[in-house]
Image (cartoon, rainbow, N blue to C red):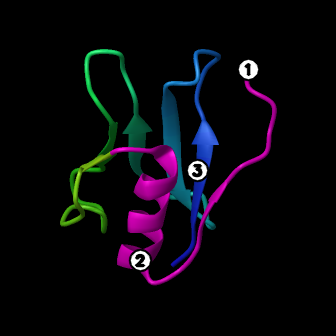
Amino acid sequence: MDVVVTPAGSEGTVWNLKDRLGRRLGTIDHSDQEAGFRITPEATGSLNPIQRLHATLDEAMTAIAKHMHGECTLDSQDWD
């Protein structure tokens, strides 16, 4: 299943995860308090068994793509 990563807000620290049908799968967040990018799956979503913490956004997206057996792409929309 393909996953689309969409920036949320203007700070550039949170991304929403949805499948191509628009179903919410979770979020990726990066804060100054943490040394990495954390994947937070929806409670009953298909991302639950995935490794949560990654050094870069690219590594987090690669882990998602591998786990979901599809592509994980960054939405190119402008940030609000």
Q: Where on the picture, by quarter, is residue 67?
A: bottom left
Q: Percent position (x, y) of residue 29?
A: 40, 33
| SS under mark 2 | helix
Spatial separation of the CA atoms under disc 3 and disc 2? 15 Å
| SS under mark 3 | strand
Contact between labelled residues 1 and 3, with CB atoms less than 8 Å apart = no
Please tell me whether residue 64 belongs to the stretch shown in magenta: yes
Residue occupying image coordinates x 38% and y 48%: 26
Q: Farthest residue toward the bottom?
A: 69
| Residue 5: mark in rendering | 3
In this view, 37 is above or below 41? above
Q: Where on the picture, by quarter, is residue 21?
A: bottom right
Q: Percent position (x, y) of residue 27?
A: 41, 42
Question: What residue is shown with label 2?
Answer: 66
Query: What span is colored magenta in the figure?
Result: 55-80
| SS under mark 1 | loop
Amino acid on which disc 1 is placed: Asp
Q: Percent position (x, y) of residue 2?
A: 57, 73
- Say whether disc 3 or disc 1 marks the residue closer to the N-terminus: 3
Amino acid on which disc 3 is placed: Val
Say left or right for 55 vs 12.
left
Residue occupying image coordinates x 48% and y 30%: 14
Residue occupying image coordinates x 48% and y 46%: 57
Please tell me whether residue 75 belongs to the stretch shown in magenta: yes
Amino acid on which disc 2 is placed: Lys
Question: What residue is shown with label 1?
Answer: 80
- Estimate how packed mark 3 is, as few (under 14), some (14 to 19) or many (20 or more) residues with alpha carbons within 10 Å: many
Spatial separation of the CA atoms under disc 2 and disc 1? 29 Å
Observer able to see residue 24: no
